[in-house]
Amino acid sequence: MDVLTDKLTALIGPVATQEGFELIRVRVTGAKNPTLQVMAERPDGTMTAEDCAKLSRALSPVLDESDPIDGNYDLEVSSPGIDRPLTRLKDFDDWQGFEAKIELTGAIEGQKRYRGVLAGTDGDNICIDLEGEDETALIPFAMVGAAKLVLSDDLIRASLKAGKDAEKAGLAPDNYQDD
């Protein structure tokens, strides 16, 4: 992460936590008309449009007061989505059994890109069963530049089930109902 992203994460993280959300990712995109992208979710993995609006309203006064980005910028609060980025070590455990793409900041044995089924973690390493290979690769989490789940039917089914389970448990608004 860069200095601005670290500063923004330190500023936004406590507000997100106070509002009941886990911060997934913070980044600034665009040079001429920057957008501050804040990605978050509830501890149960859900994030509704109402949740995004709630977090945006909570962040706006804090960002206005601290003014961490020079000039005008847009604030965008969103959920991680189905084919979510994997930004925390715990994400690789939480999404074990699903396919992911991982890009490293440096090569391991000449390879910077990996694709396979997540097999959890081992200490500070990500375990991934690579396509076409019979062994599990260990990738140091510190070397991950970007990682995300691969959209698949299994992932879509699991995401829909999680939303419905959260609704039944009373943890999410009932906007997951089938019409």
Image (cartoon, rainbow, N blue to C red):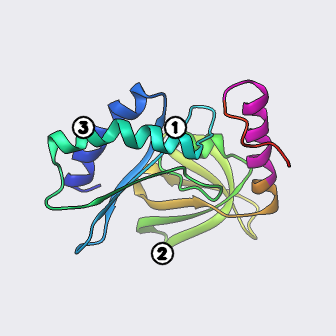
Q: Find residue 100 and report its image quarter.
A: bottom right
Q: Residues within 10 Å of mark 1 (few under 14, many from 20)?
A: few
Judging depth in this view, the residue of 32 and 5 nearest the camera is 32
Indicate the quadrant containing the N terminus: top left, top right, bottom left or bottom right.
bottom left
Q: Which mark is residue 123?
A: 1
Where does the magenta region start and end? Answer: 157-171
Q: Check the image and report above or below for 10 versus 131.
A: above
Which mark is first along the chain, 3 or 2?
3
Residue positioned 30% across, 42% down in the render: 60
Q: Is residue 75 magenta?
A: no
Q: Position of residue 30 (x, y in %)?
A: 30, 71
Q: Main secondary structure of the magenta part?
A: helix
For label 3, the residue is 62
Q: CA distance from mark 3 to mark 1?
A: 36 Å
Decide which of tag 3 and tag 1 comes sooner along the chain.
3
User: Measured along the vertical axis of the image, is residue 31 above or below residue 144?
Assistant: below
Q: Residue at x 63, y 59 (%)?
A: 83
Query: Which residue is painted at 21% across and 53% down in the image?
Result: 4
As rendered, which of 138 and 2 lies closer to the eye? 2
Numbered-mark total: 3
The Cα–Cα distance between marks 2 and 1, rounded to whole angstroms, is 23 Å
The amino acid marked with disc number 3 is Val
Residue, disc 2:
110
